Amino acid sequence: MERLWGLLQRAQQLSPRSSQTVYQRVEGPRKRHLEEEEEDGEEGAETLAHFCPMELRGPEPLGSRPRQPNLIPWAAAGRRAAPYLVLTALLIFTGAFLLGYVAFRGSCQACGDSVLVVSEDVNYEPDLDFHRGTLYWSDLQAMFLQFLGEGRLEDTIRQTSLRERVAGSAGMAALTQDIRAALSRQKLDHVWTDTHYVGLQFPDPAHPNTLHWVDEAGKVGEQLPLEDPDVYCPYSAIGNVTGELVYAHYGRPEDLQDLRAGGVDPAGRLLLVRVGMISFAQKHFRRPRQEDRLRPGVQGNTVTTAQDFGAQGVLIYPEPVDFSQDPPKPSLSSQQAVYGHVHLGTGDPYTPGFPSFNQTQFPPVASSGLPSIPAQPISADIASRLLRKLKGPVAPQEWQGSLLGSPYHLGPGPGLQLVVNNHRTSTPINNIFGCIEGHSEPDHYVVIGAQRDAWGPGAAKSAVGTAILLELVRTFSSMVSNGFRPRRSLLFISWDGGDFGSVGSTEWLEVIWGPGQVIRQWGDVGAGGSHSTLVTHPQGYLSVLHLKAVVYVSLDNAVLGDDKFHAKTSPLLTSLIESVLKQVDSPNHSGQTLYEQVVFTNPSWDAEVIRPLPMDSSAYSFTAFVGVPAVEFSFMEDDQAYPFLHTKEDTYENLHKVLQGRLPAVAQAVAQLAGQLLIRLSHDRLLPLDFGRYGDVVLRHIGNLNEFSGDLKARGLTLQWVYSARGDYIRAAEKLRQEIYSSEERDERLTRMYNVRIMRVEFYFLSQYVSPADSPFRHIFMGRGDHTLGALLDHLRLLRSNSSGTPGATSSTGFQESRFRRQLALLTWTLQGAANALSGDVWNIDNNF
């Protein structure tokens, strides 16, 4: 730059100094013109500081100035223009350099966190506490952490846990109004509430559930006290059943098989099972076969695990040995039973596949996920009394517990009578929504939600998630007030009815995505939000959410301890989670990030952290039903379950004691993790979803399938189609990655096109060849039904147990070639369809498959 300035000065010295063009202020009626005045140039002449109207003036008359030597006209003109030409070249060079520098920074594909990820709003005016102009990832991170740190997260958890908030209660109605009012006070673009009328099951105060001894003559005897009549299993079958008692460990299918192998037949008897390992619903259900797969709307096609073995009913108790025995930490009272619903599914089981709005003409059917035998939770004290009465073989060592001073026996024992009188009630539930609209892709939503209701105090179950959700709303609202605007819309949701099987979230998904007729229209937007109305649409709204939702982030069950960190998620989010873990400090390991804490114990961080989405998570329906990638974070105790979940002892005080005073730090870590994930998802120009990961997922599953390739070959069958489809998907993913890398990032049309293809990847894995009404969880990797890869693998295992061993042989309980061909076709064409969709335009599809 100094050399260029020196050249400019030298050019000025060599140029004629007798004639320079100077612009001077012109007053009066001539102010719209420019005056050009010839005057002697002098060193140090002042330059004009401000632009003002000028008039161009002609040369002075001949003779009015000292005569100058005659010059060739073109030479004189060239000498006069030289300094301006040099200055112009300098400006062009500087401008080109700056443009090239900015373009290079924007198109760099491997710059990591230094890449521009923020808004390009023309009116962007950041707060004075931050850099003027464009914000980068570090600026956004600092802004987010500053405003998050100003919150009162711990106080919100405490206050929420003290409020009654059972779905449908008066306390829940008051909390709903308070939370909506809190959202309306924030800087949100839309705030609204959806009301659904759903079928929930509650105990009958006039006819409580009971448990009695029954003597050998069948006479009902002494009643066993159920300490808390409010503890029950929603959606249990109603009835009065009698039978001898047997101990069945966790009630899994393999447990019942071992029980029968040990000479104790569960047929006609009541089963005593422990809390844990599988959900309450799974304790009652076996894996569905093809002929009786889970089909909402068809009652009884899927029978319970217990009924499959002829059992009459189930009693569920918390075994102390399964929970923390650390003396400094609190433990569950021996008189406390554990609440839990037993519907194998999500949403309102009495309106499967349809949104539960008032005035809706519900189909006269119910979910086949409802059990057909009664179930009742009991305390450890009652279980101890029952176990003392059992005779028969001694239970295996791994079945033993700590309730008795002597070994547990399998039974059978004395007779029992179980009476369940729960009743169904049409109950209004309310989901609360708040939205910050994106500036560039407002029709693409990053969704974050938390369950609001709780059967008891629910400190860990829902108070923590609700508090974190409110803090994130407040934090992002403060960021918006200070100039932040996301590229995509942020949608914050407080769910109702979660304790009954993610009823609120599933019903909303059925409205937005399913075959329902009800859709939403936003009303006028005011300073505090907007009102909304519900209207009918003649064609439904079949494809809204999977075309618009980017990711769902669940805050449920976020803090159950602080030793281990798990992320239950879709493979698409694994790489992003790894990146964000490196940005969040560990709440209990000073000086370490969460990522460093994880890899310290296991170098394979994803094996330590990543888990599949469980059905009892609100995030499950987003992925398995709608095809939207989802994640649920959980801090947990090391190899021990949080003992108070789903009990009346899930209080703020007990949660604080379990974490030994670290509850605020752990909740803050979850808020930081979720918030930084939201920033990346809502503000990166290109969605940070790793669409190539599913190729690795298929490869792992193929490793399991290869075990049976020899058996299939003996029958003239092959898995080659699956191999080819997987190859096509990998090639399509790599092709898309190369297209993105070589494209112009500043091209908004291309960016949006790529983002749409990326955000639909999860949807591509919903089988298009099965009915959503028959198989609502159509995801071939995470769903349920005969179309899934898991079902195909289970069927192949029957090859080893087929008694005939003859190629082509069929059996109602063994391997069936026709069923295998159908499963293989469903799986292969779904995977191939995903590969074709990822390829983009029709001329890019590989037709050689």
Image (cartoon, rainbow, N blue to C red):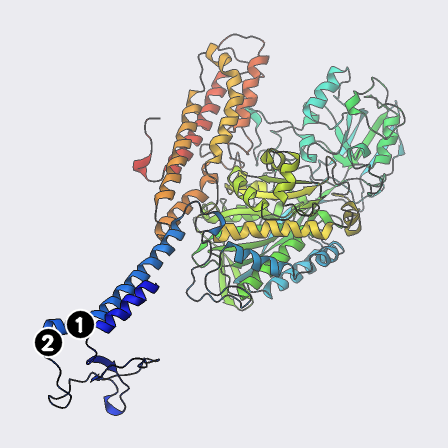
Can residue 349 be seen? no
In terms of image quadrants, where is residue 615? top right
The residue where tag 2 is placed is: 71
- In the image, taking residue 351 as reference, residue 686 lies left or right, namely left
Residue 228: horizontal and vertical position, in percent? 83, 43
Residue 623: horizontal and vertical position, in percent? 53, 40
Disc 2 packing (10 Å; few <14; some 14–19; many ≥20) = few
Q: Mark 1 or 2 closer to N-term?
A: 2
Residue shown at 28%/83% (left/top)?
53
Against 11, is 718 above or below? above
- Looking at the rendered image, the quarter that the N terminus falls into is bottom left
The residue where tag 1 is placed is: 79
Against 181, is 805 above or below? above
Can residue 494 be seen? yes
Taking depth in this image into account, of 835 and 224 the one nearest to the observer is: 835
Q: Secondary structure at mark 2?
A: loop
Residue kind at label 1, given as amino acid type: Arg
- In the image, taking residue 731 as reference, residue 276 lies left or right, namely right
